[in-house]
């Protein structure tokens, strides 16, 4: 397998995985392209490589920057913006975990808390509903707290030292 073929296969696979993780295929493909690129790419480079429109490239690059996993870079003498992806896989995982928590888990927690606060005394069914939704709330809260703890490890020197030892 040649480099171009391997690169294309990776981009297509990453795109398919991205849709399973809750982001659109094109966004994941742009991310994959930037991960494996040695140099920052312009929007035109991304459009040409992935055969996508300017609007699609622009919207998805902006979304990736909102996630904090793609950065804009400036080149002296160039009028175009260039983009690069976070290359540190540990940092990438932390940023994705934090963003997914913010976008998915925290809103679910809010709804679980709200629906589990109805009056459980009105009926047996209401009592069972409140009991089950409180259990779900507790479970999701523990999972979210665990994500917070894992992502905080990267933010303190003891955690960074521990991560280096584990590698």
Image (tube, rainbow, N blue to C red):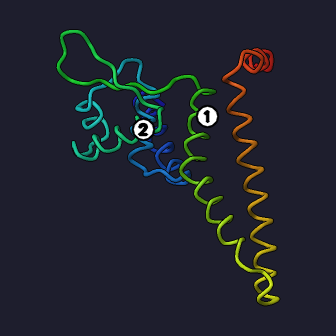
Q: Residue 20, percent across and down?
A: 55, 54
Q: Is residue 68 above or below residue 59?
A: above
How packed mark 1 is, by other alpha carbons closer than 10 Å (few <14, some 14-19, many 20 or more), is: some
Front one among 33 and 164? 164
Q: On the picture, is 49 further left or further right than 139?
A: left
Picture quadrant of residue 93: top right
Q: Residue drawn 67% across and 65% down?
A: 112
Front one among 124 and 66? 124
Picture quadrant of residue 120: bottom right
Q: Residue drawn 70% across and 47% down?
A: 144
Label 1 sits on a secondary structure element that is helix
How packed mark 2 is, by other alpha carbons closer than 10 Å (few <14, some 14-19, many 20 or more), is: few
Q: Residue 82, percent across and down?
A: 29, 23
Q: Name the residue under label 1.
A: 93
The answer to whether the residue labelled 1 contacts the one labelled 2, judged by CB atoms less than 8 Å apart, is no
The image shows a total of numbered marks equal to 2
Label 2 sits on a secondary structure element that is helix
Residue found at the very far top of the displayed protein: 76
Q: In this view, does 61 lie above or below 78?
A: below
Q: Residue drawn 56% across and 34% down?
A: 95
Mark 1 or mark 2, which is nearer to you? 2
Q: Quadrant of the C terminus?
A: top right
Front one among 141 and 69? 141
Q: In this view, does 141 lie above or below 116?
A: above
Front one among 133 and 91? 133
Q: How far apart are marks 1 and 2 (CA)?
A: 15 Å
Q: Residue drawn 38% across and 47% down?
A: 26
The label on residue 84 is none
Q: Residue 56, percent across and down?
A: 28, 47
Q: Mark 2 points at which residue?
A: 66
């Amino acid at each position: 397998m040649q480099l171009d073929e391997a690169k294309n296969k990776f981009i297509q696979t990453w795109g398919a995985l991205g849709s399973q993780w809750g982001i659109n295929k094109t966004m994941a493909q742009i991310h994959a392209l930037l991960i494996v690129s040695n140099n920052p790419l312009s929007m035109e480079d991304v459009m040409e490589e992935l055969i996508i429109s300017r609007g699609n490239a622009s919207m998805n690059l902006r979304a990736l920057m909102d996630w904090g996993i793609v950065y804009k870079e400036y080149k002296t003498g160039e009028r175009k913006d260039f983009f690069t992806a976070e290359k540190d896989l540990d940092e990438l995982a932390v940023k994705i975990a934090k963003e997914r928590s913010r976008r998915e888990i925290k809103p679910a927690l809010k709804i679980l808390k709200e629906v589990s606060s109805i009056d459980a005394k009105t009926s047996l069914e209401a009592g069972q509903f409140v009991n089950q939704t409180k259990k779900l709330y507790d479970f999701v809260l523990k999972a979210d707290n665990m994500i917070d703890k894992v992502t905080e490890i990267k933010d303190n020197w003891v955690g960074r030292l521990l991560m280096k030892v584990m590698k």
